[in-house]
Amino acid sequence: MLAPIELDDMALIARLAHGDMDAFETLYDRFNVVVYSTALRVLGEASAAEDVTQEVFLRLWRRPERFDPERERFIS
């Protein structure tokens, strides 16, 4: 079995849907800066950007099946 760091985003989402915390941590490590930077640019306030980043990843953890790879890329 490949380590999460070696997997692409789609494989990580599939593992996350089965409750794989390592997959979640890998996705967080890959995308937290992008999410935070985008939120900071839009909101203009660090604390609000931190809250949004936390909420994005919390939703991903709770409902990974909501992501539809047929409709969008994960980074979107």
Image (spheres, rainbow, N blue to C red):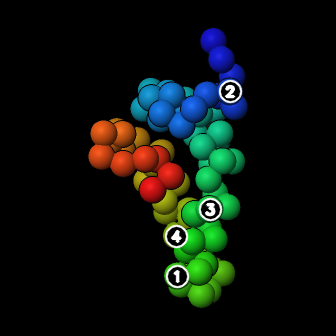
Going 61% across and 28% down the picture, which residue do you hit? Answer: 7
Mark 2 or mark 4: whose residue is earlier in sequence: 2
Mark 4 or mark 3: whose residue is earlier in sequence: 3
Q: Secondary structure at mark 4?
A: helix
Q: Secondary structure at mark 3?
A: helix
Label 4 near label 1: C-beta < 8 Å? no
Going 65% across and 17% down the picture, which residue do you hit? Answer: 2
Identify the amino acid type marked 4: Val
Residue for badge 3:
34
- What whole-number distance in Å separates the C-alpha atoms at marks 4 and 3? 12 Å
Q: Position of residue 71 (x, y in %)?
A: 30, 46
Residue for badge 4:
52
For the residue carrying disc 1, how many other residues have a C-alpha within 10 Å: few (<14), some (14-19), or many (20+)? few
Identify the amino acid type marked 1: Val
- As rendered, which of 71 and 52 lies closer to the eye? 71
Q: In the rendering, which numbered label is found on residue 6?
A: 2
47 left or right, relative to 55 = right
Q: Secondary structure at mark 2?
A: helix
Mark 2 or mark 3: whose residue is earlier in sequence: 2
Identify the amino acid type marked 3: Val
- What whole-number distance in Å separates the C-alpha atoms at marks 2 and 4? 27 Å
Confirm whether residue 63 shows in the render.
no
- What whole-number distance in Å separates the C-alpha atoms at marks 2 and 3? 20 Å
- As rendered, which of 50 and 30 lies closer to the eye? 30
Residue for badge 1:
42
For the residue carrying disc 3, how many other residues have a C-alpha within 10 Å: few (<14), some (14-19), or many (20+)? few
Q: Position of residue 31 (x, y in %)?
A: 62, 53
